[in-house]
Image: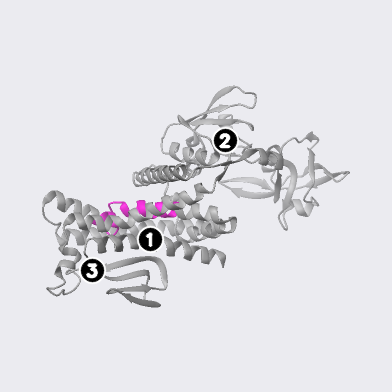
Amino acid sequence: MLTLLAFLAAIGLLVTFHELGHYWVARLCGVKVLRFSIGFGKPLWTYWRKGTEWVICPIPLGGYVRMLDEREGPVTEELRPQAFNNQHVLKRIAIVAAGPLANLLLAVLLYWVVLGQGVSQVKPLVGTVVAQTPAAAAGFAPGDRILSIAGQPVANWQQIRLAFVEAAMSPDATVVRVETAAGAKAERRIDPARFGDKAVTAMQQGSTGLTPGRFLPVIGALEDGGAAQSAGLKAGDKLLALNGQALNSWEGWVTQVRNSPGRDLDVKVLRGAETLNIKVRPQAHQQDGEVVGRIGAAPQADADWGRQLLYTEHYSVPQAALAALAKTWDTSWMSVKFMGRMLMGQASLDNLSGPLTIANVAGQTAREGLTPYLEFLALISISIGVLNLLPIPVLDGGHLMYYVAELIRGRPVSERAQLFGQKIGFILLASLMAFALLNDFSRLFGG
């Protein structure tokens, strides 16, 4: 229920703000607005104010502002000056651009609120290096402090993830400068292309095999019916040795388990004051085209390490405003570059997300608290703003493209050309939505 409510609240706010942008500038330009609709379909609620019908409809996947327009029906001579089609092209550009720009403004306001409260950040320290990943191959080690990625300085893990996403847009290996736990400066070269398309896609999503968290060689939780539970392991068991060899880290344990599908492992654990020997047989599990061992056990986080990772970054009101502007700009520009790479075939369409993934993330962030939810809203608002500015017919950017052409040519683009463009734009947008929905089902239902 929380997921549904968080999703509806997000869509309602983002769509309302977008359409208010169109509405406010249209009224400012003297255009009569006939209907302001949140959602599609038969109206559930209607309210009239100053000649505009305000409605809420049952399909919450968008909205629209319907303006007086001679192309959509007869207009009396008295109202002709208030028709959208009779406005100067610059006014039409302003009205159409106002929707996406309103979404970007909303992102700035949301980030301003978040940053004004003080933001909990994670220091750029490596806690865990996942085995058999680009980061492991590059030679990263726990305790490394990341200084810069592809020449871009980083101060926290949020910046690290964004820098990796941006670096993934280059076909070359990414150079990461670090300071080791011993205080020496070093360079690591991450090349996900050596690990195949899945590793490249993971880096495009900010993941390379590095995490700030550190885990103890202690069982934190067990999966019901998993091999670990069936063998008699319990939460709180400290792993001492595996097949007679001492275990000092959770990563070493995971590597041995992954490499032993269907084979018995002799595990020595400390449970309270008692030392026990337990035999565990990892279940064979298909993952990325190979068979690996899996026992259904999660680690216990290193609480002391976690406490030293966190710090709070405080901003004054003006500083928060400037930081919000910078964050919105950086995220918007990165989105534009990433969309360009997808269109050029240089980035995987697996990164597209549809309404199911958005709803799922909305629920997750709402459970985490108000601040994560506001950050999620800001990110989606930026995505809507940038997407709508793309020069694709049926989107705001497509209309802007026609109006800019009209401004240059001195006359409107023909209705025939616009109709043809609308058909192409609809096919392209429907294809993108189909890919996004397929990705949603794959992520959420294990396809």
Residue at 72% over, 54% down: 226
- The quarter of the image holding the N terminus is bottom right
Q: Earlier in the sequence, mark 1 or mark 2?
A: 1
**Label pair 1/3, CB-CB below 8 angstroms:** no
Q: CA distance from mark 2 to mark 3?
A: 53 Å
The three-letter amino acid code for the residue at tag 1 is Phe
For residue 400, what is the image quadrant? bottom left
Q: Is residue 134 left or right of residue 76?
A: right
Please check the rendered image and state whether residue 126 is part of the magenta-colored stretch, yes or no.
no
The three-letter amino acid code for the residue at tag 3 is Lys
Q: Which residue is mark 3?
A: 32
Residue 229 position within the rendered picture, expressed as x and y whole percent measured from the top left: 76, 54
Q: Secondary structure at mark 1?
A: helix
Residue at 70% over, 46% down: 299
Q: Which residues are magenta?
A: 379-399
Q: Earlier in the sequence, mark 2 or mark 3?
A: 3
The three-letter amino acid code for the residue at tag 2 is Pro
Q: Secondary structure at mark 3?
A: loop
